[in-house]
Image: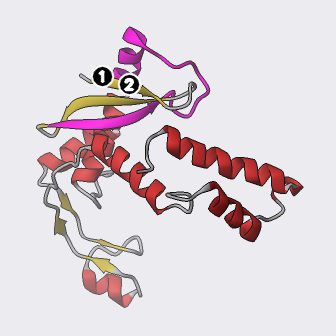
Amino acid sequence: MVTVNAVKDVDGAKQWVFITLTVDGDECRYTTVQPWNTSGPVLSGQDLEDFCNGREDWFAVNILKSMYPGARYQDSAGDTDLEKFEQWITDGHTNTAFCSIAGHNNEQDCLDAGGKWTSEEILDKIDFVDSWSIKRVTAESDMKESIFYKKTPAQINNYIDANWTDFDDSKDTFKKVIKELRDLILRLGLED
């Protein structure tokens, strides 16, 4: 069961959806975007709850991939990715040994055939990092690292003069895009 905790509009056509779900015994806070890869309507209420519950397995698999990076669970028993991942965990969260060349089941045969042998590996679970704060911190960091952070309009104009290319064959169009980005930074409160 997915719990929708909060929703934040992105641009009138998409929204951040902040959810909580239990994965591998841990309560995880996860962020998704709705509508997902579509131009459908922005959902609310029961429709949004149904959308999120319908994607619960997908959310859980992505969280498990974060908890067990590098997991090779795809060959485990199960009908869905989530069932396979959960079976892989139950079986000891172990990546089996394999050869980069099919048909070689031991290290010596693999190496003799010119393949690369990967030994068996038990993966330890890593705590899931709350994706609510990651989204915000990453967005702020990216903005602060950008060329527009703490720049005056004159500095931005100098950047445009020095760096514009034939963007839509119009320096004015490029200038408008840059100014829109700066305005967005200011509207989001990401500039100190």
Q: Secondary structure at mark 2?
A: strand
Q: Is residue 165 left or right of residue 27?
A: right
Q: Position of residue 25 (x, y in %)?
A: 11, 37
The residue singled out by tag 1 in the image is 4
The residue singled out by tag 2 in the image is 7
Q: CA distance from mark 2 to mark 1?
A: 8 Å
The residue under label 1 is which amino acid type?
Answer: Val
The residue under label 2 is which amino acid type?
Answer: Val
Q: Residue at x 50, y 58 (%)?
A: 150
Residue 146 numbered tag: none
Q: Is residue 24 left or right of residue 42?
A: left
Tell me the magenta residue range: 27-54
Is the residue under label 1 in contact with that under label 2 (CB below 8 Å)? yes
Q: Residue furthest bottom?
A: 112
Q: Residues within 10 Å of mark 2 (few under 14, many from 20)?
A: some
Q: Is residue 188 left or right of residue 56?
A: right
